[in-house]
Amino acid sequence: MTTLDTTPPVPAPGGGNRLGWALADSWTMTRRELAHWARQPVQIVVGLAFPVMLLLMFGFLIGGGRGLAGDYVDYLVPGMLALTMAFGIESTMLAVTQDLNKGVIDRFRSMPMAASAVLVGRSVADMIQSAAGLVVMIGVGWAIGWRWHDGPVAFLGAVGLLLLFRFAMLWAGIQLAMVAGRPEMVQTVQILVWPVGFLSNAFATPQSMPGWLGAVVEWNPLSATATAVRDLFGNPVVTAGSWPAEHAGLLAVAWPVALFLVFFPLAVRRFGRLSR
């Protein structure tokens, strides 16, 4: 004899709409990524400590600030905050390639969950880690004498620009990770990020460089964010009348938006093809 299941169906979150399901699935995937922190504490600590070591090395061992009027630490710390947002891309790439090669993505695709939840969960967890990294770096900067001078609104605006830059970079990292495909290839692909980091004004003013190199540095997306953040913090800014330096605030928004508009659809499209 056959019995009928009379258990009422579980209602979808958000009033049964697809957005509600997608948000619930995305939060589940975010919690999964955060749970990895407890299993990989060394990786998290190294990720937080590396930019701190760079800050201390350039601030006290190597030094710099040629052509700069003002305290070099006040110039360096905002640049290091921007650099930290760029270099965090490596952990994003490694996490995505590991999931791809362990078959985790295939298992997720066999489950009744929103296809976007995997990428959204990865990006949310990444942004939480980036915010934690900012807190650490701001604390270290304060400890070594760096200060911001233009009030809480400008401070929050600077933090917002840094996180916007990070958000764009993480989608670039997700796309590059799927192109790399394997964890051992991440180190090769991530070399592309280093010119963005070091061909910037994070450590030195473009005016202290050869003319052609200074021009390249000034148009770097990281340089635009660093200059705009320095201005909002009330820290030393060297413009020398160049267009990218004079309009750093505009470029600090335009560059991340442009990067996001390029890499987000590419990442979503490539992720959708993984199941084919």
Image: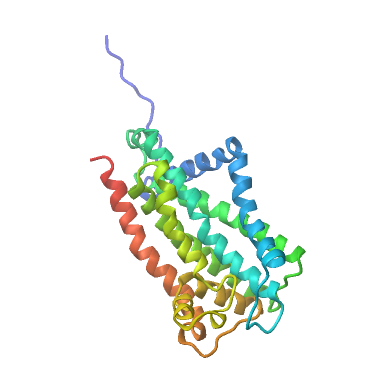
Count the marks.
Answer: 0
Query: Along the line of sight, which residue is nearer the eye, 4 or 60?
Result: 60
Q: In x, y percent, where is residue 17? A: 36, 48
Question: From this viewpoint, which residue is outermost toward the top?
Answer: 1
Q: Is residue 152 visible?
A: yes
In the image, residue 24 above or below residue 263: above
In the image, residue 230 above or below residue 127: below
Q: In x, y percent, where is residue 217? A: 48, 75
Report whether 131 appears left or right of 59.
left
Report whether 16 appears left or right of 78.
left
Question: From this viewpoint, which residue is outermost toward the bottom?
Answer: 241
Q: Is residue 15 visible?
A: no
Q: Quadrant of the C terminus?
A: top left
Q: In x, y percent, where is residue 241? A: 52, 90
Query: Along the line of sight, which residue is nearer the eye, 143 or 55?
Result: 55
Residue shown at 34%/53% (left/top)? Answer: 267
Colour scheme of the picture: rainbow
Q: In x, y percent, where is residue 273? A: 26, 45
Question: From this viewpoint, which residue is outermost toward the left?
Answer: 276
Q: Quadrant of residue 118?
A: top left
Residue shown at 65%/68% (left/top)? Answer: 77
Query: Along the line of sight, which residue is nearer the eye, 28 or 243?
Result: 243
Q: Quadrant of residue 145?
A: bottom right
Q: Quadrant of the N terminus?
A: top left
In the image, residue 20 above or below residue 246: above
